[in-house]
Image: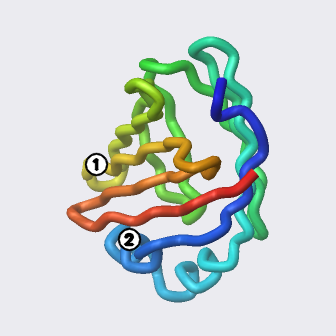
């Protein structure tokens, strides 16, 4: 339950390059750099309710660890996958519905910050959130 709370994006690393690799056009990438993303996480056992709020959209996501679910990324890309708990880290593996390529992501608490990592086709990125 350590992830519980509201987290606001503080900084990103290599996020533009990651989005470019995902095929997101330059206009959407520039907007995403200033999305003011806020994530509210509520964990109850192996069930999660997440609310993502940004300049562009608000989305509620419910999932259970280990069970597949469908999700639409902010740019509209449709994926399907699962989240697993690995020690203190959440690990997600999602397959794009348009090209069957895999996006992996993790969420971990590091020094009081929520660090979310992404990997797609060999490009890594990070977004760091503060409570």
Q: How far apart are marks 1 and 2 (CA)?
A: 13 Å
| N-term-proximal mark, 1 vs 2 | 2
Residue shown at 50%/52% (left/top)? 116
What residue is disc 1 on?
102
Compare residues 34 and 29 and report the one nearer the observer. 34
3, above or below 109, in the image: above
Residue shown at 39%/56% (left/top)? 118
Residue 59 in view in this figure: yes
Residue 108 on image: x %, y %:
50, 42
Q: Do the residues labelled 1 and 2 touch (CB within 8 Å)?
A: no
Residue 108 located left or right of residue 22:
right
Residue 11 picture quarter: bottom right
The number of callouts visible is 2
State the SS at label 2: helix
Residue shown at 70%/56% (left/top)? 130
85, above or below 30, in the image: above
The residue positioned farthest toward the front in the image shown: 111
Residue 52 in view in this figure: no
Residue 82 picture quarter: top left
Compare residues 17 and 60 and report the one nearer the observer. 17
Residue 86 located left or right of residue 72:
left
The residue positioned farthest toward the left in the image shown: 122
Are there few (<14), some (14-19), or many (20+) residues within 10 Å of tag 2? many
Q: How is colour applied across the structure in the image?
A: rainbow
Q: Which mark is residue 125?
A: none
Are there few (<14), some (14-19), or many (20+) residues within 10 Å of tag 1? some
What residue is disc 2 on?
18
Residue 50 located left or right of residue 117:
right
Q: In which quarter of the image is the N terminus?
A: top right
Residue 47 on image: x %, y %:
62, 18
23, above or below 94, in the image: below
């Amino acid at each position: 339950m350590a992830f519980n709370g509201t987290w606001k994006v503080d900084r990103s690393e290599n996020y533009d390059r990651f989005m470019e690799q995902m095929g997101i056009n330059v206009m959407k990438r520039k907007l995403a750099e200033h999305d003011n993303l806020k994530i509210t996480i509520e964990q109850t056992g192996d069930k999660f309710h997440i609310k993502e709020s940004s300049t562009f959209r608000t989305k509620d996501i419910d999932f259970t660890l280990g069970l597949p679910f469908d999700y639409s990324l902010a740019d509209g890309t449709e994926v399907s996958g699962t989240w697993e708990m690995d020690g203190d880290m959440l690990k997600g593996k999602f397959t794009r519905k348009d090209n069957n390529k895999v996006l992996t992501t993790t969420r971990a608490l590091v020094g009081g910050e929520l660090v979310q990592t992404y990997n797609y086709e060999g490009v890594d990125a990070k977004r760091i959130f503060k409570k």
